[in-house]
Amino acid sequence: MAGSLTIRGLAKAYRAGDGSETQVLGGIDLDVPAGSIVSVVGLNGSGKTTLLRILAGLEAPTRGVIAIDGRPPALGGPRGIGLVCQDVALLPWRTVRGNIALGLEVRHVPAATRLALVREYEDAFGLADSSGRYPRELSGGMRQKAAIARTLIADPGVVLMDEPFSALDCQTRNRMQAFLLDIWARRRDTIVLVTHNIEEAVLVSDRIAVITPKPSRVEAVLPVDLPRPRTRTDAGVNALRARIIDTLRHLCRQ
Ligand SMILES: Nc1ncnc2c1ncn2[C@@H]1O[C@H](COP(=O)(O)OP(=O)(O)OP(=O)(O)O)[C@@H](O)[C@H]1O
Ligand SMILES: [Mg+2]
């Protein structure tokens, strides 16, 4: 059930033990239309994870407003915000099935409904044969799939992904990008994807937001007006990638 995400003037400052204050987010404004994929790119330490953690309700902003379809987000359930973390956070003592079912259990979805839904997701994610395995018994790509399935099964209004494919080898990463687009084409989730991989951002996104170093704000939002499916060798993909790299290089020098 995709919703549109609106972020206005979102700011965050951390206070260190010595009383000094670091302004991490300097006022982020961003619109993510319902059913679209918006990537956020920026240098290390520019506050991308901080932004997602605030959006997911794990931290409070210093100021600013977040809304889904014009209303404050409800966390966790349908119409809320789901987060796929930078480090895959599967519970090691739960099987694939147990991990995927977690969000439904928390919401007290009846066992029979839960099982039917989890099976559907295991099938869609190619995890049916691994449903009884534990995270340590899975490859990195399978863990990523389980983590994404666990978030999507709760049907959040907005899905946040923090560098979800960064730990994967090149081939697995390419497969996961295609897989994400495949799932998205069926469900049309609203997705915010944080990535350092500019090619990935261009291949999957509708828009790309480039953020400045901290205190960060949105430097530019570039529309990706390229038909899907896109390939890495498309001239349009290469041109946009070069433009974003140039923007980041410019920000590095500031
Ligand atoms: N809990 C915290 N207390 C103090 N400072 C913090 C805290 N969390 C993050 N920071 C600081 O905020 C800044 C932004 O961190 P954040 O993790 O959001 O960056 P990022 O853009 O996600 O970086 P990366 O690309 O490396 O993942 C960093 O300088 C970091 O040290
Ligand atoms: Mg980060």
Image: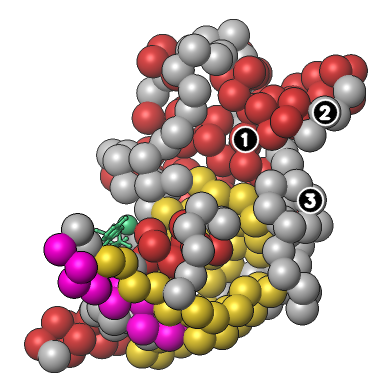
Q: Give the label, 1 or 3, closer to the camera.
A: 3
Q: Quadrant of residue 56?
A: bottom right
Between circles 2 and 3, the one closer to the viewer is 2
Q: Nearer the viewer, residue 135 or 78?
A: 78
Q: Earlier in the sequence, mark 2 or mark 3?
A: 3
**Callout 2: few (<14), some (14-19), or many (20+) C-alpha neighbours within 10 Å?**
few
Image position, residue 131 (x, y; %): 61, 15
Q: Judging from the image, what secondary structure is the residue with disc 2 in?
A: loop
**Amino acid under disc 1:** Arg
Residue plotted at (22% across, 62% down): 16
- Which one is nearer the viewer's eye here, 136 or 177? 136
**Disc sitting over residue 78 in the figure:** 3
| Horizontal side, residue 63 vs residue 25: left or right | right
Whether residue 204 is visible here, answered yes or no, is no
Ligand 1, seen in the image, is in the quarter at bottom left
For the record, the magenta segment spans: 18-30
| Eye-nearest disc, 1 or 2 | 2
Tag 3: amino acid: Pro
Q: Which residue is mark 2?
A: 108
Residue 150, numbered circle:
1
The N terminus lies in quadrant:
bottom right
Verify whether residue 235 appears in magenta: no
Q: Dividing the picture into quarters, in which one does residue 171 lie?
A: top left
Residue plotted at (45% across, 33% down): 89
